[in-house]
């Protein structure tokens, strides 16, 4: 039985763990894949206070070590369901069951897909959702990035240093991304903007050969990096948990409608999804969980 179980070892979950451990609570963090969350896919973080230019990987590794040095246990298991009963929560994975007196949901988000006919078949054969993970396979080649948010522009910039040519395909002629990032992208000679365009077709059987847009362009690329936003990992996790547009409904106090369950990071309803707001949520959710345990 743990005092606090945290689901998700991204910046929000690991920061919550640090706060819980420093308050002498027994704490476990569940992670299905790799510690660090979405930020491990970011090449350089330029907007986190006091750590200019740190890589996403270094940030994650340092955060994980900081938590583990405080005695936080990281359990590599995917929690598929959380069941509240009396003053205990049961966290269920495929093979195991764990118990805790309170829970912090910090499960983050997953990439949104284009939902094109052969998209799934071409994943790993031209279609990717992560430039930092797969960009190296396209050294010296032509690739496309789809999207107009901060993630897409970061991906385009990262790929422009590896690939011969990067087409940035976006459905509008204005970008949702920060102005500073847009300026950097526009200054790159090998990034070509393809605006007011949606990707309508992926051509290629064994491997991606080209993409077709709905405004009549066929672009020959061997790689397509889809970066059109994210979907929260919350649906079906806890019966009765209030969701808004699939995000866990919560205010700045990180409390949910279920006493004892708190939420932190990108999976929460919020205005600004940033690294700094994720770590901030972690601190708030852990403090709220500690106060809940003391009541
Ligand atoms: P995002 O900001 O939601 O942007 C998604 C982009 O994809 C938008 O340009 C959107 O177009 C486009 N899009 C959505 N659905 C589409 C579809 N079906 N077909 C074509 N295009 C589609 O998502 P994100 O870039 O992944 O960022 C997620 C959050 O993390 C944001 O809050 C972002 O600021 C934050 N973030 C911050 C940084 C940073 O360095 N500060 C880095 C990465 C992420 P429209 O603009 O037309 O809606």
Image: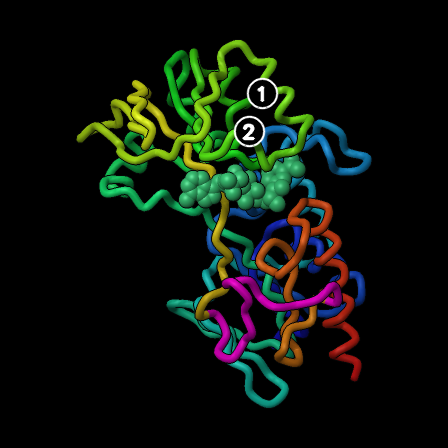
Determine if the C-beta at disc 1 is less than 8 A from ligand 1.
Answer: no
**Which residue is drawn at the image coordinates 55% and 62% (left, top)?**
247
Mark 2, residue position: 153
Whether residues under marks 2 and 1 lie with C-beta atoms below 8 angstroms apart, the answer is: yes
| x then y, percent, for residue 229 | 50, 44
The quarter holding residue 26 reads bottom right
Mark number displayed over residue 193:
none
Q: Is residue 103 above or below residue 36?
A: below
Q: Is residue 158 above or below residue 263?
A: above
The reply to whether the magenta stretch includes residue 259 is: no
Spot occupied by residue 130 in the image (x, y as percentages of width and height) = 46, 35
Q: Nearer the viewer, residue 95 or 138?
A: 138
Residue at 59% of width from left, 37% of height from top? 176
Question: Residue 264: horizontal and vertical position, in percent?
Answer: 65, 60
Identify whether 12 is placed above or below 169: below
- Disc 2 under 8 Å from ligand 1? The reply is yes
Quarter placement of the N terminus:
bottom right
In the picture, residue 142 is in which quadrant? top left
Residue stretch rendered in magenta on the structure: 237-253
Tell me the chief SS of the magenta region.
loop
Q: Residue at x 65, y 70 (%)?
A: 262
Q: Residues within 10 Å of mark 2 (few under 14, many from 20)?
A: many
Lower sequence index among marks 2 and 1? 2
The label number, if any, that marks residue 185 in the structure image: 1
Q: Residue at x 59, y 29 (%)?
A: 43
Q: Secondary structure at mark 2?
A: helix
Residue 168 seen anywhere in this rendered image of the structure:
yes
Q: Is residue 45 above or below residue 88?
A: above
């Amino acid at each position: 039985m743990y005092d606090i179980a945290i689901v998700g070892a991204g910046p929000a979950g690991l920061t919550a763990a640090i706060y819980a451990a420093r308050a002498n609570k027994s704490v476990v963090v569940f992670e299905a894949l790799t510690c660090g969350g979405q930020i491990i896919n970011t090449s350089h973080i330029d907007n986190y206070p006091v750590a200019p230019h740190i890589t996403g990987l270094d940030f994650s590794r340092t955060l994980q070590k900081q938590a583990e040095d405080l005695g936080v246990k990281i359990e590599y298991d995917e929690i598929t369901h959380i069941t509240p009963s009396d003053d205990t929560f049961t966290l269920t994975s495929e093979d195991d069951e764990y118990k805790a007196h309170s829970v912090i949901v910090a499960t983050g988000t997953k990439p949104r897909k284009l939902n094109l006919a052969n998209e799934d078949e071409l994943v790993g054969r031209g279609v990717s959702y992560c430039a930092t993970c797969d960009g190296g396979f396209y050294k010296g080649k032509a690739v496309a990035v789809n999207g107009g948010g901060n993630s897409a522009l970061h991906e385009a910039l990262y790929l422009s240093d590896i690939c011969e040519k990067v087409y940035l395909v976006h459905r509008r002629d204005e970008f949702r991304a920060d102005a500073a990032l847009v300026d950097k992208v526009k200054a790159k000679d090998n990034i070509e903007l393809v605006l007011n365009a949606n990707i309508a077709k992926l051509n290629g059987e064994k491997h991606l050969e080209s993409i077709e847009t709905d405004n009549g362009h066929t672009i020959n690329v061997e790689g397509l990096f889809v970066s059109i936003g994210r979907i929260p990992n919350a649906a079906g996790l806890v019966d009765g948990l209030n969701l808004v547009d699939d995000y866990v409904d919560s205010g700045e106090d990180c409390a949910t409608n279920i006493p004892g369950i708190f939420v932190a990071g990108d999976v929460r309803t919020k205005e600004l999804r940033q690294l700094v707001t994720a770590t901030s949520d972690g601190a708030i959710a852990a403090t709220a969980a500690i106060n809940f345990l003391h009541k």
